[in-house]
Image (cartoon, rainbow, N blue to C red):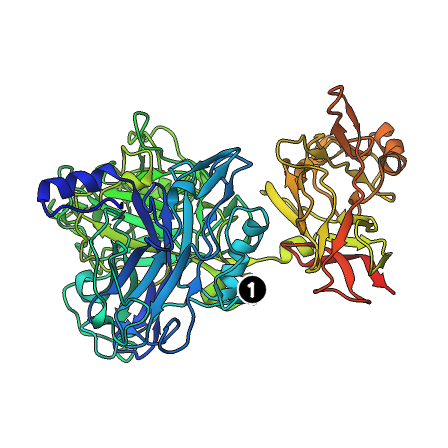
Amino acid sequence: MFRKLVLSTVFALSSLSAFADVDLRTTITDVQYRGACERAGVINFNVDGNEFAEASETDPVYMRLRLDHGAVLCQTLVSENGGQAPIHLPAALELGYGSEGDTVNIAPDGVSIVRWVQGEPEIWIKITDDSNDWIRSGDQLLPPSPERVISFTIGIDGATSQATNEMLFQMQRANLAASLQNNAVADTLLNVDLSNSNLEPRPAPLEDSALNFDPITFDSQTSNVESSASFRDITLGQLTSVAFSDDRTIARAFNDDVIDPPPTGDIDVELRTTIREVHIQNDNQTTGMVQFYLDADEFAEASPENPIYIRMRLERGATLADDRVEPGADHAPIYLPIILDGPEGYTVAAPATAVSVVRWKAGEHEVWLKITEATSSWLRNSSTGQLESPSYDNPVFFNIGLSASRSMDDAQDAFQQGHANLPFQTTKGTRNLPSDLSFTVDLREAYLEPLPAPQDVSALGFDPIAFDSQTEGVEQEDASTGINLGQLQPIPFSDDRVIARAFASHFGSNMTLSGNSRALDYDKNNQRLGAVKADFTGDIFRNTEGEFPLSLPPGFSLSKTLVGEGDAPINVALKVRNGAEAGIEMVAAENAVTITRWVAGETFIILDVNQKSDEWLRLNGQLVAPSEQNQVRMVLGNSASGSLRSFLRKYNAGLANLPANMKINDANGLPQAADTRARVDLDRAQVGVGSVATWTFQYSGEVANVGQIEE
């Protein structure tokens, strides 16, 4: 039986705290407050506990998502009466969670949307697979846990779902390659009808302008979800004790018809950003900076005893790449300079600790700021000696996303003139050492598309929101799921929130792929493909390390495992091509590039880059990256002896990092030349005579032809 909520306040509270949350992560979009079909944000469900124990086809758990403010769905996606079948959602164990060999053990229809009807305020999701067995680790079946989080998502198009899950599915870390309806890739875009809602446009307070949803789960006594003509005819079962986190806002209402709305007393914190180029699927990319520009008494209620917290949440699945301010015993806030942007006659009176970064942890989606001094006393009138707040004539600002040196450049002169409370951002608060707050992000799991894709899918933004002092755990809790949010503060932020645009051309402009095409027999399996050469002509992996797939087209799959679970990787040899500058040396590490996955039945291999490309070569005593003149080549698809013939002479001359592609011999533990000849099986339902086998470098689109099917 499922855990039931007892109608006793004490027991209900204790049981909610005892069981792990379903951690909700949303994106927030701008919607026209009376629009008939507006696009709301994305909802990501992260299950980190055994929340759906004993769920089955005959004893399912139903999850209801109800929109507030009178909003309803503007499209029908799933309706038994209307003939639209359920949409099955991919449930994934994302990379970075669990052990390397862990796989997902969830049925393809284990998590499904079973009701999504135009004009109704509810979406219904059905879970029919026991979460006790959702993850296979070795010979054990395990439930989700904080170390093994299972996630599923609604609010995205089918292409995004496929791009996010397809590789995870091939690695058996997702139960589906995309959201599917009748075996076709399906959209779950969250389009809402607000024409009869009671939302008020900003700058109305958040409780009036924010569109939210309320999640709740019921047991299998729930009936008529799929079959009833109206949601009002659904019979609810008993509540189950699945606890959801508080990230439930999916849109903010605006009135696009009003150009200059009259003042309401709620004055925006003006956001000013710079936008930088970032490259998709990279684990360490630097975005632009964010400036908070204040010209009124926006934080009048803040004090050391009652601080105001600002949460800056990255959108589109991006996470922070570096630890800047970690919670816990070693917690050391970084204090930000408050800088006056006004005429003479005023100085900054705010203490050094007035504004600080109090949480910035790698792998999380959020940066947290803390305001501990009322803005009403941030400035001092030099003539009267009175403390005043920022104003239209005397605005102030503070910045996020600056390097240590840039922070010093921005604030030091102002500090010497009394126009800043710190000379740079610092962990000390006593003006000793500058700190780095460069905005570095991990985009490996982000669902960004490279330009020229539209801004709504190529732009990386953030969502700011303010909470009062009832917020707990920001500076103490190791996991962000342990943070208890306080009350929302009616502090509107302006809309300049984009800090990066996604590109993919960085890879393609710095490499070329070429292949030797071999004839393939349509009637045979286990056929050898030709070799593939990658020539690096620029700093392709600048500021970048991580996993990069080479993939085969549909209909071709690997027939032999070269690197499986638990196997030693293959170190890939790199050599300087002929025609390079005199004095060039190859100094790349032996494991600069490795093959960490090459498994029979799959359609890709994984290259793991462990050293940045600007550390591969040395010229005149300086480390340099590959270039048009100093090109670097790797070759896959050769026999062990062929690889030795290709690299050994260069290795002896100091122009290759290895004498061949190398692997540790399992029998004697010694390195030996590795065979990287690729053999494939054919799916004859997808290929025919004339079909071409290719290797594709996923993040540039570079393609090498290595085989063609002949009669």
The residue that appears at 17% across and 70% down in the rendered structure is 263
Above or below 486: residue 431: above
Q: Quadrant of residue 619?
A: top right
Quadrant of the frame with the N terminus: top left
In the rendered image, the residue lying farthest to the top is 668
| Res. 277 in view | no
The amino acid pointed to by label 1 is Leu
Write down the residue under mark 1.
451
**Percent position (x, y) of residue 217?**
26, 54
**Percent position (x, y) of residue 253?**
26, 69
**Percent position (x, y) of residue 564?**
66, 37
Above or below 169: residue 352: above
In the rendered image, the residue lying farthest to the front is 58
Report the side of 246 relative to 179 (left or right): left
Give the camera-side residue of 427 and 651: 651
| Res. 711 in view | yes
Give the camera-side residue of 531 and 580: 531
Give the camera-side residue of 489 and 472: 472
Above or below 358: residue 26: below
